[in-house]
Amino acid sequence: MTKQRGDDAIDDSHIVEAQDLVQRGRLRNRIRDRTQYAHLLLEPLASLEQRGATPARSKTIKTRYERVTNAHAVDSRTTLKRIQKHLSDLHKLGFLQRTNRNRGESGGRYDEYDLDLAPEIVLDSSDEIETERDR
């Protein structure tokens, strides 16, 4: 990295940048290890995160998921319960944060989700995975 920048010596900024690159690489590998279903579910969450629309309810995520699957020409037929189960699994794996909400009798009890990693990593990984599949 020092040579790429044309610097003579290593300083703290080089170390921080190298650590960031390693962390991003690890996260990309973790995302690649998931199923296609998980990739397609992380993508709408990343998009919502970039728009500042998180945390989001599973109904909102399902709607976005259906758009993503249609864009990738993948069968999007699934139930809300199945989406919720996969969101719960992704939360347990450390990809998502989950917030439990209770609005009482009038609003009910529900969960909201947001990414626990940078949305750019998810979107970049999704693009890389899609490119690899097309080869």
Image: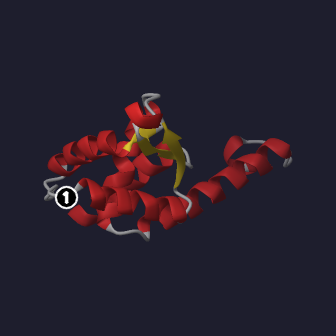
Q: Is residue 53 above or below residue 91?
A: above
Relative horizontal placement of residue 124, taking residue 71 as reference (left or right): right
Query: Is residue 96 visible in the rendered structure shown here?
Result: yes
> Which amino acid does the dot numbered 1 rest on?
Thr
Q: Please state, as top left, top right, bottom left or bottom right, where the C terminus lies in the image.
A: bottom left
Number of numbered discs: 1
Q: Is residue 130 above or below residue 32?
A: above
Q: Residue at x 55, y 49 (%)?
A: 97
Q: How is the image coloured?
A: secondary structure
Q: Residue at x 13, y 54 (%)?
A: 73
The residue closer to the viewer here, 29 or 59, is: 59
Relative horizontal placement of residue 18, taking residue 97 as reference (left or right): right
The residue closer to the viewer here, 57 or 24, is: 57
Q: Position of residue 75 (x, y in %)?
A: 13, 59
Residue that carries the numbered disc 1 in the rendered image: 78
Q: Position of residue 24 (x, y in %)?
A: 58, 55
Residue farthest to the front, as pictured = 105
Query: Is residue 8 visible in the rendered structure shown here?
Result: no
Q: Secondary structure at mark 1?
A: loop
Mark 1 residue crowding within 10 angstroms, few (<14) / some (14–19) / many (20+): few
Q: Residue at x 70, y 42 (%)?
A: 5
Q: Position of residue 64 (x, y in %)?
A: 27, 41
